[in-house]
Image: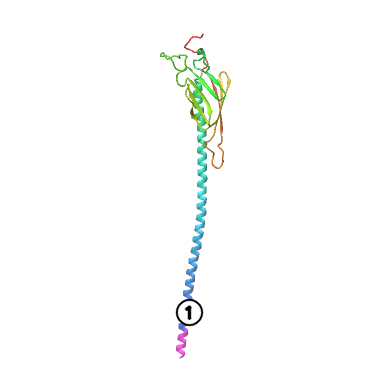
Amino acid sequence: MGIDHCQLISVSSVTLWRTSGEQQTANRQLNERGFSLIELMLALALGSLFLGALLTGLHQTQIWAGNLSRLAARDSNLQLAQLLLSRLISSAGSNLRPSGHQSVEVRADQLILRADLSGAAEGFPDGSLDDPFESIALRQRDGRLQLRSGNGSFQSLLEPVDSFEVQLQTSRLLRLRLVASTEGELAAVRQSLPEPMELWQSLPNLRPNLFAKED
């Protein structure tokens, strides 16, 4: 009877020890699963923050790139305007004095340039301005720099152009001021940032006709 009781106590102790060990293992596994879940949540949170910062940086970069592109286009228009105006004005007045035509005329909103560039079969000026670009007019209208050749209609030459001012300083010196802006407002700035260009152009061709006798 005593032996059976001891054996029962021993079996109970082993059972309790096993149960306690299994419980500790289960708790350890539960704790490990809990820590893994917390780590996953932290990783997701950190990943979200990193992704948000990355997207914000990319958006800001796109804004800067768009603004730089618009500014570069504006400056390119100003450079092109300077080249075109210099080219058109450089021939104004060629061989016009005997013909009685006014070579450079500045009106309220127009610059008119005349030159006898072609003519008779011999190649000499013929005293008329019938050929294209022997009489041209420039003006600013509706945000554009416009050009008219002869008696034709005005055509867009450059845009956007905010203003175009012309002054005849002397009989041989012309002052032009042109203001161009960006194509639309710059992002995050809400302005078109107009940029002025001033051009002083000499008129070297205001001389008598070299191929005809003076009256």
Indicate the quadrant where residue 125 lies.
top left
**Which x, y percent locates residue 153?**
48, 25
**Above/below status of 192 relative to 136:** below
Q: Residues within 10 Å of mark 1 (few under 14, many from 20)?
A: few
Tell me which residue sits at (53%, 26%) in the image: 139
Q: Main secondary structure of the magenta part?
A: helix
The residue nearer to you, when weighing 123 against 9, is 123
**Which x, y percent locates residue 94?**
49, 17
**Which x, y percent locates residue 210?**
48, 12
The secondary element bearing badge 1 is classed as helix
Tell me which residue sits at (47%, 84%) in the image: 9
Count of numbered tags: 1
Residue furthest out toward the right: 169
Residue furthest out toward the bottom: 1
Residue type, label 1: Leu
- Left or right: where does residue 122 sit relative to residue 183? left
Tell me which residue sits at (52%, 43%) in the image: 63
Look at the image and tell me in which quarter the N terminus lies. Answer: bottom left
The residue nearer to you, when weighing 148 against 41, is 148
Tell me which residue sits at (51%, 44%) in the image: 61
Tell me which segment is drawn in magenta.
Answer: 1-9
**Above/below status of 41 relative to 128:** below
Coloration mode: rainbow
Instruction: Specify whether residue 145 is painted magenta.
Output: no
The residue wearing badge 1 is 16
**Which x, y percent locates residue 98?**
51, 12
Residue furthest out toward the left: 121
